[in-house]
Amino acid sequence: MKSELQHTNTEPENILFFNVVQIIENRKINIISAANSQIVLMFWEIGNYINSVILGMERAEYGKKIVSTVSSQLQQKYGNEYYVRNIRRMMQFATQFPDFEKVSTLWTQLSWSHIRELLPLKTIEEKLYYVEEVNKGFLGVRDLRHLIARKAFLRRNNANLQITRQSKIPFNAFKDPIILDTLGLKDNYLEGDLEQAILRDIEIFILEFGVGFTFVARQKRISIENDDYHIDLLFYNRDIKRLVAIELKIGKFKPAYKGQMELYLNWLNQYDRRDGEEAPIGVILCTDANRKVAELLELDKSGIAVAEYWTKLPSKEQFESKIQEIMTEAKERIARRKLLGIANVQKQINYFIEESSDEIDKD
């Protein structure tokens, strides 16, 4: 936009005008972000103060009554934003996240609308996962709602279950399964059709695959002794600082795919890896992950992961059931490995925000 304006009209006053507009627009974004942050902190303070008052009361019924009374008074003075249910959300927010310093640093990119989506989630770990996704990707409420509805946290955890002590794949690098229902693929599609559909909606694919990915190349050509090979999709992930090769397959995962991906990763590591980058990793996307076979091949030791992709989203009940089934099977495989003396890494979670067992009435 800047170069177009300067080429069409390079009068000093027009250039001055454009640059001033850029300053204003940039500051407007910061002002909105700062305003949202202050609202969130104000609501936390309100919830925390009301919680402290109610905790000092002996009768729970009187505690409910005082919340209703304060809500009415605040609505008369400041408007409908302070209705009873929203006051209770403020109390719930302060209860779930009692450390003000952590709240003030973690939630800078989140509006109160974001937080309302997070409060019903079951665990602190799940909430913090989505906070991090919003902060990294500057995600709006609609995108956050999209991730929550599609169980991004559980799918990320399921992918992590593939990782063993000897793994070359970092935690939280991808999800399993990958949901690609928005690509509009018809039945009997080919691998090339899938690739084209992903490229048409690359932003949606990146949101689904994970915040931090940047598209690098399609059909990346690598030449080895006069033979050419092509990597379907190549991305760079700035969070884990490495190239990520993606191969798209229709049908079950096959053992032969391992050798193919190892060749690609070794070439990328030797000829395309830059200073400061970690070793490349690969993800093979199949319509059937064939997980038992993939486990026996110990793919993660070679920096390779397998994930299913779904081109159609099942009903909510079927979706939840399928995700739980996949995770149960993965945990059973880990249990068997432990019996054989092959222990998986246990992910260490920093619970730097205390989880409270107290529940605030949501009514």
Image (cartoon, rainbow, N blue to C red):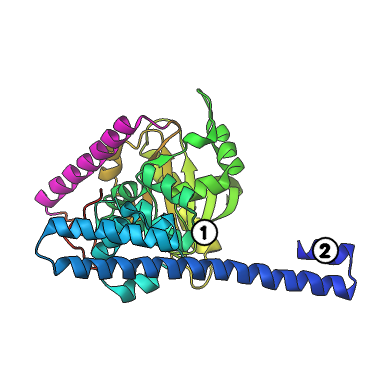
Q: Earlier in the sequence, mark 1 or mark 2?
A: 2
Q: Which residue is the site of mark 2?
A: 5
Magenta highlight range: 313-341
Residue 296 position within the rendered picture, expressed as x and y whole percent measured from the top left: 25, 43
Q: Secondary structure at mark 2?
A: helix
Q: Nearer the viewer, residue 198 or 40?
A: 40
Residue 92 position within the rendered picture, expressed as x and y whole percent measured from the top left: 26, 59
Q: Amino acid at mark 1?
A: Tyr
Residue 321 position within the rendered picture, expressed as x and y whole percent measured from the top left: 26, 34
Single out the mark in the foreground, 1 or 2: 2
Residue 280: say if magenta. Answer: no
Question: In this view, which residue lies farthest toward the top?
Answer: 187
User: On the picture, is 56 further left or further right than 136?
Assistant: left
Magenta residues, dominant SS class? helix
- The residue drawn where x is 30% and y is 62% is 70
Q: Quadrant of the N terminus?
A: bottom right
